[in-house]
Amino acid sequence: VGQENINTDIVTLSRFFTEEQAKYPDASGDFTLLCHALQFSFKSIAYYIRRASLINLTGLAGSSNTTGDDQKKLDVIGNDIFISAMRGSGKCRIVVSEEEEEVIKFDEHPNARYAVVCDPIDGSSNLDAGVSVGTIFGIFQLPDEVLGPNKDVGPEHLLHPGTSLVASGFTMYGASAQLVVTMRGGGVNGFTLENSLGEFILTHPNMVMPSKRSIYSVNEGNSSLWEDWTNEYFHSLKYPADGEKPYSARYIGSMVADAYRTLLYGGIFAYPADKKNPKGKLRILYECAPMAMLFENAGGLAVNSRMERLMEVVPENIHDKSGVFLGSHDEVQKVIDMYNKHQ
Ligand code: AHG
Ligand code: MN
Ligand code: MN
Ligand code: MN
């Protein structure tokens, strides 16, 4: 009987961060510690999502958040897990979460140099059906002048464009938990949670997305509210010029899951601004900007409903929303061309 080919030299997420840190001799190791706390929160959230139907964690919490969503029980639990992990890391000074109206400050860690934004459970309307959901995060570094006791931090230290993020990523809780992370100026790497080991293992090194693919992902139920150019764009995908194949539609309704598929297979994911929601639905700080960074670093493009680069959009308030188009380079270029034709 032949022996199985066993890989005894596995790259775990911890090893990955340690090796990344070694590239920067001046690095304090704080970022690595913050990331250890992040990955613990993902494992923990994954655990409760998988047990939800068994331990009465399905359904609504009975409250709503600042952006008007009814909170699920797991939205609240995911938020609490995330915030505790960030507080416990000792390296995080302030957090913005979809589920918290105001920023959360950790005054007990006045020297912590990181600010973290997060959507603890993205796609929570899918939770009770066992459909994939995720956690989105972005990390900013605070300026030296706000470090130390008696210094105050606030939303003004987080109202920055995606270009200021030092890292971003998401974990998708699907058939397996998939963590995708990128750092400023770096590539995109994907990890799979190996449940028996309890470790995220590097399974998708240097992710580069296809430059085009005929798949579109949008909530088409909103089309009567779309602007004319948006309707003409999606129509053009379904009714292409003679001889060309129409696009396939794929819409999960969890941005993380739709974005993960789009990163792997290519295509376009959109949540356009419309007549009812002229500012769009998805939130700039903890949904749009982290995703835009991942897409750009994987070779794709990300723009808002005015065709501005999403990475450069500066939110005025922590829960501000935006229209979004993320995808393969050539697919987003088609959106831009259609928009320009209508100006
Ligand atoms: P969240 O569950 O974090 O509030 O985000 C929901 C978002 C996003 O995941 C998804 O792309 C979109 O809402 C789906 O919205 P529709 O149900 O309007 O299509
Ligand atoms: Mn929500
Ligand atoms: Mn979300
Ligand atoms: Mn959410």
Image (cartoon, rainbow, N blue to C red):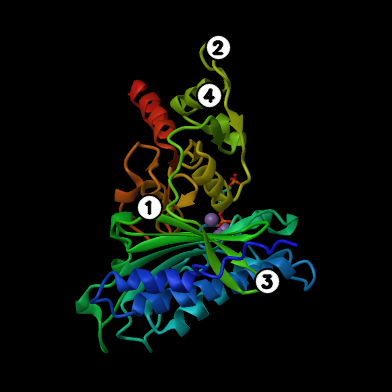
> Residue 293 got which mark?
1
Q: Residues within 10 Å of mark 1 (few under 14, many from 20)?
A: many
Mark 2 and mark 1 residues within 8 Å of each other at the beta carbon: no
Kindly report the distance in space between the C-alpha atoms of the residues bearing marks 4 and 2: 13 Å
Residue located at (40% from left, 31% from top): 330
Kindly report the distance in space between the C-alpha atoms of the residues bearing marks 4 and 3: 39 Å
Q: Whole-percent x and y of residue 11?
A: 49, 67
Q: Nearer the viewer, mark 4 or mark 2?
A: 2
Q: Which residue is mark 3?
A: 48
Which of disc 1 and disc 2 is earlier in sequence?
2
Q: Which residue is mark 4?
A: 237
Q: Nearer the viewer, mark 3 or mark 2?
A: 2
Residue located at (39% from left, 75% from top): 32
Which of disc 2 and disc 4 is earlier in sequence?
4
Q: Amino acid at mark 3?
A: Tyr
Residue located at (37% from left, 22% from top): 342
Q: Whole-percent x and y of residue 42?
A: 56, 69
Which type of secondary structure does the marked residue at label 2 adopt? loop
Q: Residues within 10 Å of mark 3 (few under 14, many from 20)?
A: some
Kindly report the distance in space between the C-alpha atoms of the residues bearing marks 2 and 1: 35 Å
Which of disc 3 and disc 4 is earlier in sequence?
3
Within 8 Å: ligand 1 and the Cβ of disc 4?
A: no
Q: Which residue is mark 2?
A: 243
Kindly report the distance in space between the C-alpha atoms of the residues bearing marks 4 and 1: 26 Å
